[in-house]
Image (tube, rainbow, N blue to C red):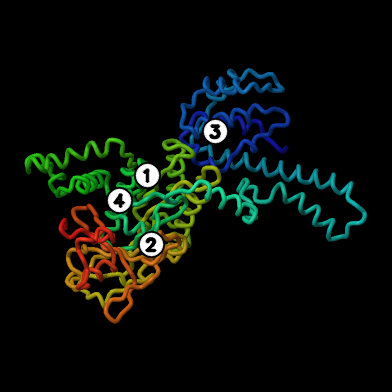
Amino acid sequence: MIFSIEIEQQFIATLLQHPKNYGLIANFITYKDFYSESSKVNQTIFSVLKSLLEKNEVVDPIVISERVKSLGISFEDNISISDYVYSLSMRRTSENALVSLAKELKKYTVRREIYLSCRDVAKKMKDVSDNLSYSEIINEADSIFNDKINMYESGDNRPENIAEEMEMLVEERGNNPIEEFGLVGPYKKLHDIYGSLLRPGNISVVVARSGVGKTAFCMNFATKIALTHNVPILHFDNGEMSKEELIMRQTAALAKVPMHLLETGKWRQHSPETVHRVRSVWSKIKNLKFYYYNVGGMSTDEMINTLRRFYYSEIGRGNQMVFSFDYIKPSSKLERGQSEWQQIGEMVDKFKTCIHKEILHENLPIIPMITSVQSNRQGITNNRNSEDIVDDESIVSLSDRITQYCSHLFILRKKTTDEIVDEGEAFGTHKLINLKARHLGKDIAGALEPVRVGDQLRRNFINLEFKNFDIEERGDLRDIQLFRNADANIESQSELDIPNFDEI
């Protein structure tokens, strides 16, 4: 057999009763996986159900029945759609069976495609020209066969000749120019130099030693993005931060009050100014959508499935979302014979595949990802002078695939004592040093051209001020050099994106 009506019905029944699991099969099953030569009823019901799920609408048997009827399609078996859908909704199903049913359904699709391909090849071979050579006959058959089944698991994902679309795409973009590609981040200097760190389908990674502030940076960045652009954030915590801890950190950063006052509840007794600052946050976060999920102990596949389910059930296909993951580290669920570096490589690969090739809108990625990873011991800066610090890719721990798959890679570290003395306290407490930038902003020179410091040429970096879990940008290395210059005019620094030192 090249189809199974029973499996089609059980699959639809399971999806109908457990719609939140749609994300697990959203990019795997299409209407083409339902046999339609004898009846289009299952194919039509699935298409309507899929439309409801992707629009995040209520899944109800009556709604589905009415939607199907409104299409005006007549089915060969004169079936009563209302009774049919209702009977499916009453079937005994198992929530965990949806993926296995989808795989079985896909097997029939493959068999059907192969059968149809062979039928087409047989028909073609009957009519093939006698003038064709042996190789041409083989190529003709091979072309017909593979046209239907090649890359069937990826749907329409086939190699494409990009030259065919080049003129149209570039000219269309010229007719409809956009200000920015990707979400504009909260730090202007950083954005101008390196462009958006949240481009759809891309991963930005911050590498730092434990306790330096990688979680604080990613949280601060994502929260400010959500507040500015009204974009929901899905934040996966890898088992180290509780929901309450993150709430207190976010509130401390937004209110600019000490965290211990919030944790102890003594903020109300501290001062009228403190009370005002804390309560001013409530209006700021009125429309904030920052979703927390503890994924500690979960395998990579379980995390990916949770991400898919959440996106399709809570956000909806076509709607933008930012994925924040804190942070890349080995899971306790190592497969037999698998090393930690292999697991990490697979983890990053699967996250990249999910946001770049699986969760799409109009065949384009829609979700950016920001995450962090701990540096190895070479990244230690405590009790060291600046000349003893390693600021290159060798400090990235766990797997080279982290560097390979990310679009932006930054080192985040505290400034050493001699750096603070040399550069000045006005230029912040931390450095953000770019190691890799697949995309750049309008200030390309800031990323590519070294900065002359005395007799040396040094890589540019961004200055950051960490204070009470809030983070402010304090210019870059070029700004430090301008300030050191005796001819620098501090009052005109705002025109050059240099910090206003009167306010520091």
Q: Earlier in the sequence, mark 2 or mark 4?
A: 4
Q: Position of residue 378 (x, y in %)?
A: 31, 72
Within 10 Å of disc 2 (Cα), the crowding (few <14, some 14-19, many 20+) is: some
Identify which residue is drawn at 19% across, 47% down.
Answer: 252
Give the number of the mark in front: 3 or 2: 2
Judging by the rendered image, the residue that carries numbered circle 4 is 219
Q: Earlier in the sequence, mark 3 or mark 2?
A: 3
Residue 90 can be seen, yes or no: no
Give the number of the mark in front: 1 or 2: 2
Q: Are marks 1 and 4 in contact (CB under 8 Å)?
A: no
Is 289 left, or right, of 493 in this rendering? right
User: Disc 4 marks which amino acid?
Assistant: Met
Q: Are marks 3 and 2 in contact (CB under 8 Å)?
A: no
Is 477 left, or right, of 490 in this rendering? right
Within 10 Å of disc 4 (Cα), the crowding (few <14, some 14-19, many 20+) is: many
Q: Earlier in the sequence, mark 1 or mark 2?
A: 1
Question: How far separated are the C-alphas under marks 3 and 2?
Answer: 44 Å
Judging by the rendered image, the residue that carries numbered circle 3 is 50
Within 10 Å of disc 3 (Cα), the crowding (few <14, some 14-19, many 20+) is: many
Judging by the rendered image, the residue that carries numbered circle 1 is 234
Judging by the rendered image, the residue that carries numbered circle 2 is 443
Question: How far separated are the C-alphas under marks 1 and 2?
Answer: 30 Å
Residue closest to the eye, 395 or 172: 172
Residue closest to the eye, 122 or 253: 253
Is 394 left, or right, of 429 in this rendering? right
